[in-house]
């Protein structure tokens, strides 16, 4: 297995796996806010680093979702384009990284508030299937900030669910 194959974000992505991973993020983020220690904010940020780099491949939460929870509990597949999900993970990395740095600097309350934003976004994804980062991705793509070539499936409805084609 090459480094390139490991550091590749999947496209398409099973939306149920993404939602399940978001649920696990919510649990860890709530614990991080309750305990309010840099270690937990760091673990939260590290999870996002791993998911941005490789999707579920290197992420413990991603692996738990893809290999255990979705196949054995959810038992559904809904394929969605990968680039918006990677963009959403990148936003999660920025937010959790900010909370981690704030916590390291002794601004625990600010880290908790920042993580609260992450909890809200991950809850929307997990519970309602509304990916805030994906919505921002679509907005930026429609405005030409993100080139259409980054995600052709985002603009072509026939490509949105390759399993159905």
Image (tube, grey):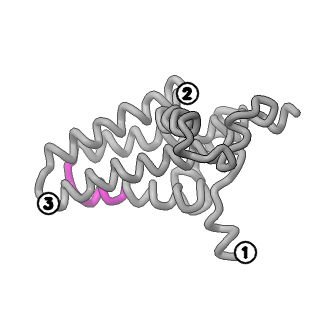
Q: Which residue is mark 1?
A: 1
Range shown magenta: 35-44
Is residue 37 part of the magenta span, yes or no?
yes
Q: In x, y percent, where is residue 153?
A: 73, 39
Which residue is painted at 28% across and 47% down in the image?
32
**35 lies left or right of 7:** left
* Predominant SS along the magenta part: helix
Q: Which residue is mark 3?
A: 105
Give residue 129's mark. Answer: 2
Asked if labels 2 and 1 touch by Cβ distance under 8 angstroms, the answer is: no
Q: Which is in the foreground here, disc 1 or disc 3?
A: 3
Is residue 19 visible in the rendered image? The answer is no
Q: Classify the position of the C terminus by image quarter.
A: top right
Out of 115 and 60, give the one closest to the viewer.
115
Residue 65 sits above or below residue 4 on the image: above
Name the secondary structure under disc 1: loop
**Label 3 packing within 10 angstroms: few (<14), some (14-19), many (20+):** few
**Label 2 packing within 10 angstroms: few (<14), some (14-19), many (20+):** some
Residue 137 sits above or below residue 64 on the image: above
């Amino acid at each position: 297995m090459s480094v390139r194959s490991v550091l590749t974000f999947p496209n398409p992505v099973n939306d149920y796996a993404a939602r399940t991973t978001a649920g696990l993020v919510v649990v860890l983020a709530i614990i991080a806010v309750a305990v309010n220690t840099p270690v937990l904010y760091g673990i939260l940020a590290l999870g996002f680093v791993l998911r941005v780099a490789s999707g579920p491949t290197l992420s413990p939460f991603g692996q738990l979702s893809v290999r255990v929870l979705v196949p054995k509990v959810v038992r559904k597949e809904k394929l969605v384009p990968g680039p918006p999900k990677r963009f959403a993970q990148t936003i999660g990395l920025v937010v959790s990284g900010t909370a981690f740095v704030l916590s390291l600097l002794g601004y625990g309350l600010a880290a908790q508030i920042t993580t609260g934003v992450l909890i809200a976004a991950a809850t929307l994804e997990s519970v309602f299937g509304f990916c805030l980062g994906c919505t921002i991705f679509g907005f930026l793509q429609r405005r030409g900030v993100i080139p259409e070539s980054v995600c052709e499936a985002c603009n072509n409805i026939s490509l949105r669910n390759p399993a159905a084609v």
